[in-house]
Image (cartoon, rainbow, N blue to C red):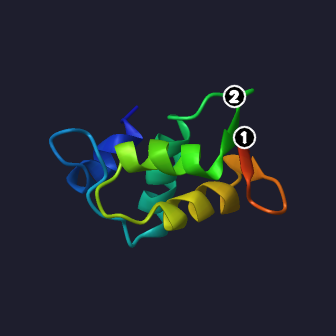
Amino acid sequence: MTNPLEDIKGFFNEKGQLKSWPAKRSRKLVAVEFLAGKFEEGRTYSEKEVNAILDEWHTFNDSALLRRELFENKWLDRTLDGREYWKK
């Protein structure tokens, strides 16, 4: 079985950070799953903490896009006001 990250290896820099966001939906899903792996289950994060983690793992300066993708793809859930996040 192939490693799904192989399909998006061109989107990473030498430090293992996403350097751009894939256009293809299938590749986006792999990237979102990669980012979701950076969060612990059973822990609640503030929006600021989520942004800090995401900023460690991407270089294109769009943590809002990544937060939204994690939420919309059901990797993270959040309070209605968006102040707290947790891994599903």
The residue at the point 47 percent across, 60 percent down is 63
Q: Residue 60, how many percent across, how many down? A: 31, 63
The residue at the point 39 percent across, 50 percent down is 55
The residue at the point 72 percent across, 40 percent down is 86
Q: Is residue 30 visible?
A: no
**Contact? badges 2 and 1 (CB < 8 Å):** yes
The residue at the point 62 percent across, 28 percent down is 40
Q: Is residue 48 visible?
A: yes
Asked if residue 9 lies left or right of residue 41, the reply is: left
Task: Determine which residue is flagged by label 1.
Answer: 86
Q: Amino acid at mark 1?
A: Trp
Asked if residue 26 lies left or right of residue 41, the reply is: left
Quarter of the image holding residue 11? bottom left
Q: Amino acid at mark 2?
A: Glu
Asked if residue 53 lies left or right of residue 43, the reply is: left
The quarter of the picture where the C terminus appears is: top right
Crowding at mark 2 (Cα within 10 Å: few <14, some 14-19, many 20+): few
Disc number placed over residue 41 in the picture, else none: 2
Front one among 68 and 84: 84
